[in-house]
Structures are given as structure tokens and as C-alpha cells.
Amino acid sequence: MLKIDKLEVAYGAIQAVKGVSLEVRAGEVVTIIGANGAGKSSLLRCIAGLEPAAGGSIRIADQDCTRLAPHKRVGLGVAMSPEGRGVFPDQTVRENLLLGAYARRQDKAGVQRAIEREFERFPRLREREAQLAGTLSGGEQQMLAISRALMSEPRLLLLDEPSLGLAPLIIKDIFKAIRQLRESGLTILLVEQMAKQALGVADRAYVLETGCITLQGSGAELLNDPKVKAAYLGSH
Ligand code: ATP
């Protein structure tokens, strides 16, 4: 589904991603864990086409997408739920969802069904359907960001730190939704600092440190890896 090879992302002289190679196969949930500033968001944004690749290549569904415009990647089935949620604050919940379905706006019945499906996934969103997104709580905005990404019916969902800044109970809800998406067969690339939950839901995982992959394995292997335990799980 996704294959990236020696990918580099740079901001002027700062190299945020330094030759990362990784693969996400259809139906897998793959997690990237890493500390602040490790380059996780830069990597995801580059996969979505929001940052240019300074080197290397990105293949999505067997097509070279390294220089493809973001909306064309949406056409190939990629959707991203960005860090910091990135909902449109002055639009209502429903309007945000409709914007997520922009590429398929002609399919009115399909879009309505998708809205209903997202309201079932996150009943809070139904209750707040007409509320401006900027006035939602952090957790509700995160739910909306995920639902908005799902409105395009992606084959590959990119999730950037969905648990960031949320209370433990809300984090539980978000991971429950990720598990359900996984069971439905969706392919997911999840970037997280909440290493324990993220590795628990992952088929495979990578550790990103200052722009380089330093470890990889199954979610269970990395959960039990002494270096991961010491650096990311707060226990030895
Ligand atoms: P966090 O979890 O804190 O969001 P991250 O792993 O997602 O971190 P990135 O946001 O990708 O890391 O940042 C990687 C490096 O690139 C950091 O050193 C950051 O300061 C730098 N960086 C990110 N965006 C920009 C930008 N627009 N201009 C300059 N430097 C940037």
C-alpha cells in the first residue's frame, strides 16, 4: 500500500527526516514512535504531499507519488488526520465532515451515509453537529479530525498523534476507534508519543530518532524491547 525509500525532508539547513525507508502493507496498522522533534510529523506530511521530499521516493498503491500534488494522493486513497487536529474552527461539525468528502461531493447519498457512519462511530459528533468546530473540546476536535479524514473513504489513513493533549478516558475512546478501523481492514500509519497504546494496536512498528529509523519489529516485540521500555514506556 505504501513504500517509502530513503526519504528525506528538510527545512532549509535543518534535516528533519534523514533517509527513512519503511513499508505499510494492505490491512496493516503500522506505528511510528519517537520523541518530540524526531521528525514524525514531517514524515507523515511528506507522505501526504504537504512537504516536498528532499530525496528518496514514495510509492502509494504501486504508483510513484514522490512529486504528486496532495489532492491527487487523496485520489489514490490517502487521507490524513493532522497533528493539532487542524479542523476548520469557523465551520460546523457537519460542514467539516462535508469538506472531508469534497473529492466525492457529487455522490450525495454516499456522503450522507458516510456522515451517519461517523456519527455512529463518535456519537458526540452527532450531538454537536451544528456547533462550530473551534468551540469543541480537544477530544471532540480529535474525533472530528479522524472522521473528516475518513469521509474520503481512504485506503490508507495517516494519523498524526491522535492522543496529543487528551485526557486518558478520551484517549481510550480514540484507540477503541483505531482498533475498530483496523478490524474493518483499513490500512493505518499511526504516529504517536503514547508508545504503550500505539504499540498495543500495531501489527508492526518503527522507532524514529532524530530523523532516522533506529529499531523496527512487531508491536509486541517493541513493547518488550529493553531500549523501547527505557526510552518510551517509562519502565525498565
Ligand atoms: P513533535 O512530536 O514534537 O511534533 P515530530 O517528531 O513530529 O515532533 P517534526 O515536527 O517533524 O517532529 O519536526 C522535526 C524537526 O524539524 C524539528 O527539529 C523541528 O523543529 C523541525 N521543523 C518542523 N517543521 C519545521 C518548519 N516548518 N520549519 C523549520 N523547521 C521545522
Image (cartoon, rainbow, N blue to C red):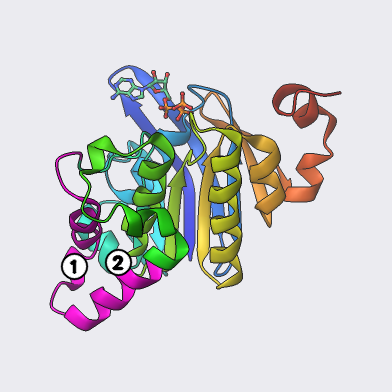
Of the four image quadrants, the one with ligand 1 is top left
Across and down, in percent, residue 34 comes to: 59, 30
* Quadrant in which residue 209 is drawn: top right
Q: In the rendered view, would you say 120 is above or below 48?
A: below
Cβ atoms at labels 2 and 1 below 8 Å apart:
yes
Label 2: how many residues lie within 10 Å, few (<14), some (14-19) or many (20+)? Answer: many
Q: Along the line of sight, which residue is nearer the eye, 179 or 32?
A: 179
Residue shown at 33% from the left, 36% from the top:
54
Q: Amino acid at mark 1?
A: Ala
Residue shown at 39% from the left, 44% from the top:
140
Look at mark 2 in the image and give the residue it sits on. Answer: 152
Say whether residue 193 is left or right of residue 204.
left
Q: Secondary structure at mark 2?
A: loop
**Dominant secondary structure (helix, strand or loop) of the stretch shown in magenta:** helix
* Quadrant in which residue 85 is drawn: top left
Q: Secondary structure at mark 1?
A: helix
Q: Does residue 218 appear in this view? A: no
Does the beta carbon of the residue at mark 1 sit less than 8 Å from ligand 1? no
Across and down, in percent, residue 28 comes to: 60, 63
Residue shown at 51% from the left, 22% from the top:
36
Q: In the rendered view, would you say 191 is above or below 184?
A: above
Q: Residue furthest front?
A: 127
**First of labels 2, 1 by sequence position:** 1
Could you say which disc has been placed on residue 103 in the image?
1
Residue 109 on the magenta span: yes
Residue 66 on the magenta span: no
Cα–Cα gap, marks 2 and 1? 7 Å
Q: Magenta part of the protein: which range?
A: 89-118
Q: Does residue 190 appear in this view? A: yes
Across and down, in percent, residue 154 comes to: 37, 67
Across and down, in percent, residue 114 comes to: 32, 72
